[in-house]
Image: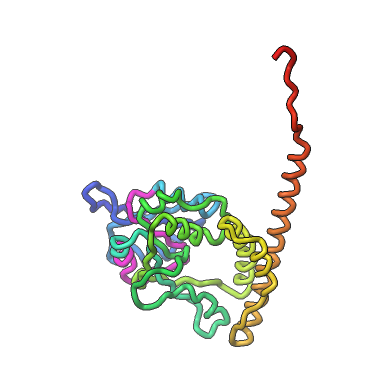
Amino acid sequence: MTDGTRGPDGRPEVSVICCTLAAADEIETLRVLAADGFDDYEVVLRRDEGLCAARNAGIREARADKLVFLDDDAVPEPGYLAAASTALDDAAVVAGRVHNSLPEDHVLAGFAPHYDQGDERAPASSITGCNMAFRREAVETVGGFDERIEWGHDETDLLRRLRDAGYDALYEPGMAVTHPYATSVVDYWRKMYRFGSADVYLDTKWGVPLSRQLFELLIPFRLTWPPRAAAVEAVGTFLRNVSKARSFRERYRAGRRARAELSETPRTVAVPAGE
């Protein structure tokens, strides 16, 4: 942990929360931050089971009111923390810029259009979990991250709750990192499969009708160019839909078990004699 102690109350200006299984000296992200010239910060490393649980634990441990979340493979670009701190003076929710670290000719290079929202500050259309920042009072107001989410869409869920609570999100291009959307085609396919169950949880939580969720399973492919990228994405979409279908089946079976248990529960309770 790097301690920042320049505030009048002895607390750092920024807390950087990083959830990881790696040792601190193995994380390039931390080495880059340490060399960037902004030293009024601390690093909170969490290794708790479950990403959302780890993030919430990081919030509790952090001493600053400005909370920055970085993945351990998101490499900050020059001026990162200064940009994050300034942005958090202006907004309680900040989405950073993410440059896909894959080369431009890689088949997956264009698979994350939401990563980069442009060169200018603007209202954020989304936030990306590998690079996001919040003022403490905002995340505490909405109860932090949903720990029932095992993986995927946790930042989307949080952003929806923050917006419902009246917080607007700001996109800050100077708060930039380089981060791979996926490390390989196989890694991308694994990621898409994991997104399937996350899709079902998020949609169900937010009241998306089951008919709409099922309808989306019938639209398995989108037009993508070039053909090789289209083929890779088609397989990923297929795997995502397989995961969705399995999640629907598990929820259906769980519902049947619950109804069966309810039907076996006595509807009347015997009253002891004399009462």
Image side of residue 183 versus residue 83, left or right: right
- Residue at 48% x, 73% y is 114
What sort of colour scheme is used for the picture?
rainbow
Residue 3 lies in magenta, yes or no?
Answer: no
Q: Residue at x 46, y 73 (%)?
A: 115
Looking at the rendered image, the quarter that the C terminus falls into is top right
Q: Does residue 31 lie above or below 111 as drawn?
A: above
Does residue 201 appear to the left or right of 47 in the view shown? right
Looking at the picture, how far across and down is residue 224, in whole percent?
Answer: 60, 83
Q: Is residue 84 magenta?
A: yes
Question: Where residue 64 appears, x then y in whole percent?
Answer: 32, 51
Question: What residue is drawn where x is 48% and y is 75%?
Answer: 100
Residue 182 percent across, percent down from the top left: 55, 71
Compare residues 230 and 44 and report the one nearer the observer.
230
Residue stretch in magenta: 62-85
In the rendered image, the residue lying farthest to the top is 274
Question: Can you name the residue that lies furthest to the left here?
Answer: 8
Please indicate, yes or no, whether residue 129 appears anywhere in the rendered image.
Answer: yes
For residue 135, what is the image quadrant? bottom left
Where residue 116 sits, quadrant-wise, is bottom left
In the rendered view, would you say 79 is above or below 221? Answer: above
User: Count the marks: how many?
Assistant: 0
Q: Is residue 4 above or below residue 85?
A: above
In percent of width and height, residue 234 lies at 66, 77
Q: Residue furthest bottom?
A: 226
Give the residue displayed 53% in from the left and 80% down from the top.
110
Quarter where residue 122 is shown: bottom left
Look at the image and tell me whether residue 24 can be seen.
Answer: no
